[in-house]
Image (cartoon, rainbow, N blue to C red):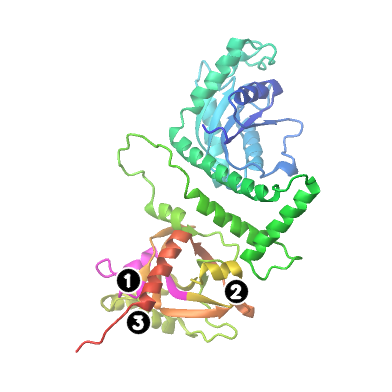
Amino acid sequence: MEKSNHILVVDDKREDGEAVIRSLWKDHHSALFYNFDIETPLVPEEVKDKHCGIRVVFQDILLFPGRGTPGNLDYGAAQGVLESLLSEDNGPWLMVAWSTWADDPDVGDKYAKELFDFLHERLSEGKKPYSYVVIDKRPFTTDGNHGAVKHDDDLTDKEKTDILESIRTELSKAPALSILTAWESDIKKCGSGIVNNLWGLVDSAVGQTLDEREARLLELLFKLGKSQDGRLKPSDDIASPVYELLAELLSDLQTTLPNRSIKHTFTGGDPGIDPSLINSMLHWDSSVSQKQVPGIILLYPDEIDGVEMINFGSDKKKCGFIFSQFIPEANQDAAKKDTDFSNHISMVILDITPPCDHAQRKAGWRRYIVGLKVNDECQKHFFNDNKLANDALRSTPLFSSTNEKFLLIFNSRLICSIPDQTKKFKNIPAIGRLKEQLLKDIVNWNGSMSTRPGIVRI
């Protein structure tokens, strides 16, 4: 397990939590201890959703002592703590059941499995544990049973070593996740490198006070923001352009990362994951917060101020246009007989404005390519022998979103432009965004279609 990945410890007894924390510190791991209190079980507001990148949680099973065996009250308390502490995008973590009930002499890991199942079923999608291991506390407690773990001063050197070795052993049981945590750690190093480079520019002069360094750093950040957005004024919030520029630096730097060795006897078998889910992870972003970003996809606007758009007026006319522009002639009769056809398609526009125009906020008129969002049930009408109607069309892979599968088909002959200042622009619904790799592929394809040479033959 990477040393830079954070570890969380949740326990109702301070001695029990500190025993783990001290061992983790000895192994140079970053670790956080949340001391659960039955008198105030709710997590304070100031720390809610603050923890991201937690890859291991040492979780006590019995958080309400004196009630006999663990049960749903304890599991619910653990759920409440983790739901509150972890951020929405925390991602998978290994649950280490650190408890006197973790490896019961009569029922084994029954209670650890119950807790894991409870958390996996009820925690939000980005906060779920992916597996669990157990470490029995009882060899280190004051009574050798369900009492508190001995104070650090009372633990023998052998007991401290045994705790540390138990932790190392259990953390080594997640080799697949360790591949991702190693990459995650390297990305953090890239971010640190950028911060270091920026600070090096500011800290170059000798004899500066902290206030002088702070002033120079603020001016540097404004200058960087100004380079990203030429319209930026000193009174503006500079967060958006500065974040964009730093993200570009990070993207560039991470391409230079040395590849770590990833060796395993792979079978080459099917991982059992729907390919449309993998495609979505790679190329599709359904969480849209801004409408003027590269790759944004909006529903086709029938009318918009100052722009002459095709206003179909009826579904029949719109379907006729779609048949002529997107569907192979051999498939059109079947498509016309499909009574659900219009329910499974939506006309969309994809923003293909050059990224530099986005970055400098100088697009003026944004350029869009017209296409269709086609639900999986309807895609058969658009392909004939696995081919689209003509070379002017390009499709994306099949994506999965909330309760639906769909793909997008774009037509390089259908291009429109919409000015930035259009009043009704904000009212156009956005459905998602193509990520950079697929967006570049479509933009390059569209460019090649627009500039392809031709000759007249006799």
Q: Which badge, 3 or 1, comes first in the chain's sequence?
A: 3
Q: In the structure shown, which secondary structural element does the residue marked by tag 1 occupy?
A: helix
Find the distance from the CA under tag 3 to the CA under tag 1.
12 Å
Residue at screen point 66% across, 40% down: 85
- Taking depth in this image into account, of 351 and 402 the one nearest to the observer is 351
Asked whether, in this view, residue 313 is left or right of residue 446, the answer is: right
Residue 417 in picture, x, y percent from top left: 52, 80
| Residue at the spot of label 3 | 324
Q: Give the crowd class for mark 3: few <14, some 14-19, many >=20 residues within 10 Å.
A: few
Q: Is residue 378 magenta?
A: yes
Q: Is residue 167 above or below residue 184?
A: above
Find the distance from the CA under tag 1 to the CA under tag 2.
40 Å
| Residue at the spot of label 2 | 362
Q: Is residue 272 above or below residue 58?
A: below
Residue at screen point 44% across, 54% down: 282
**Residue 126 shows up from this direction:** yes
Q: Give amino acid for label 2.
A: Lys
Q: Which residue is the extreme one toward the left? A: 458
- Taking depth in this image into account, of 332 and 353 the one nearest to the observer is 353
| Residue at the spot of label 1 | 381
Asked whether, in this view, residue 365 is left or right of residue 36, the answer is: left
Q: Indicate which label's residue lies in the foreground, 1 or 2.
A: 2
**Residue 340 shows up from this direction:** no
Find the distance from the CA under tag 3 to the CA under tag 2.
35 Å
